[in-house]
Amino acid sequence: MALTASARDVVRLRLVRHGLGPVTGGSPDGPVEVVERLLALQAQDFTAARWAVGVRAPGSSADDVRRAIDDAEIVRSWPMRGTLHFVPAADLGWMLGVTAPRVLAGMRTRRGQLDLDEATLERARGAALSSLAEGRQLSRAGFLAALEAAGISTAGQRGYHLIAHLALTGTICWGRQVGSQQQLVLLDGWVRAPRRLEREEALGEFVLRYFSGHGPATVQDFVWWSQLTVADARVGLDVARDRLTELQVEGIAHYWAAAADTGETGRPPKQRTPVLALPGFDEYLLGYRNRGFAVADADFPRVVPGKNGIFLPLVLVNGRVAGTWRRKSGPSGSPGYEAMAFTGLTERQRTGFDRAVQDYTRFFQPHGAPAAAGQGEPREHVERPGLPEGPLALP
């Protein structure tokens, strides 16, 4: 029989599964453990994505995230929704096996408009295998030059879509960072121990990992997040059901990891610190179709102003979005941060916000460097890997 839970319980439990609740017992998770638990974190904005990991791994730094990427423990690619994500390197292959066919089908019309036929795509694959063989790596510009040298035009958005196609079909992915740019590498040579799962097993793993990292959530939330069909989601749920707990919330079935303790129902949500400064595009909001547990409907347009698909950084208080935040110029032009609260913050909450952005500042400091207020904003510009924001099917 399913347990009954309240909206307050959902918020409290999600904070725990997201790694935003109090740290209890043992050491906090590191970057790799964070990504393994959530399975995927949206990462088209490289700075925001690193902080999405860091805010869930207290005491870690941007250097730690970079090291996990350089060591091929975390990989950045397009496993879902035609959008860049951080995923555990070992899981990328089976994820692409179940998600890529639908994404590629959605890109078919645009490929035709760009005159990218199957013969051209196969020639591009051959050029990738040749130019990146034996562990070689290339920046986006270097890789596009290699395609041009092979007689394949990369003009306009052709280069973007060639990279996307090769990533979605499991030929390439983004590897280590050199200077300000991530390098393209061959996926098979970069990921040392990929997990091999049959389709039904992969669907079950997909469902289990989503609800383990994002639960309690609904099947509809999972379908939106993964962009799999409802039928595939149901297959995955059947495979994973004995490892999940069902919670009835306002008459709707929600699922989460069976091994996790729900605690005493009715308790108030509790964060690790009273106020958290989450990045834009954070999974706490983006990971669900129904975002009402995290933000009031009336406030949501202030999180995504102009309905332009750009999710602003979030001020989180007791598991609810209380506003957004941004960088600003302080005295004498020094960098600082300000919160744009929806209904105002108490003095204690403003102090909590100041501490939260100090954590953000500290995260981007090189190891051993003091974190002066406002001086942790990352100065390097990591090139976004040559693809438009949002789904790749868009022109």
Image (spheres, rainbow, N blue to C red):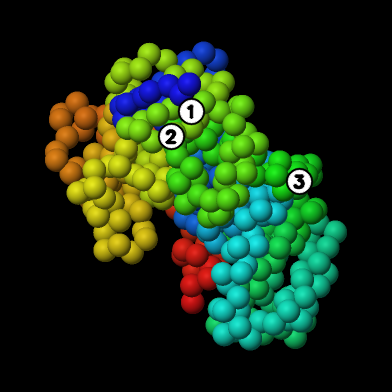
Q: What distance separates the C-alpha of mark 3 from that of mark 1?
A: 25 Å
Q: Residues within 10 Å of mark 1 (few under 14, many from 20)?
A: many
Q: Disc 2 marks which residue?
A: 253
The residue at which mark 3 appears reads as 198
Q: Which residue is mark 1?
A: 246
Residue at image location 45% in from the left, 39% down from the top = 218
Disc nearest the viewer among 3 and 1: 1
Write the residue at 54% across / 32% down.
Answer: 212
Label 3, residues with CA under 10 Å away: few <14, some 14-19, many ≥20: few
Q: Is the residue under label 1 in contact with that under label 3 (CB below 8 Å)?
A: no
Q: State the residue in front, 110 or 310.
A: 110
- Residue 161 position in % (x across, y down): 60, 73
Indicate the amino acid at tag 2.
Ala
Regarding mark 2 in the picture, which secondary structure is present there?
Answer: strand
Above or below, comparing residue 76 to residue 266 in the picture: below
Amino acid under disc 1: Glu
Q: Is residue 382 visible?
A: no
Choose the circle earlier in sequence order: 3 or 1: 3
If you read the primary sequence from the N terminus, does the residue marked by circle 3 or circle 2 appear first?
Answer: 3
Q: Which quarter of the figure has residue 82?
A: bottom right
**Where residue 67 sits in the image (x, y, percent)?**
63, 41
Q: Amino acid at mark 3?
A: Glu
Q: Residue at x 71, y 63 (%)?
A: 169
Please state which of the two labelled residues, at mark 3 or mark 2, is closer to the viewer: 2
Q: Is residue 127 above or below residue 247?
A: below
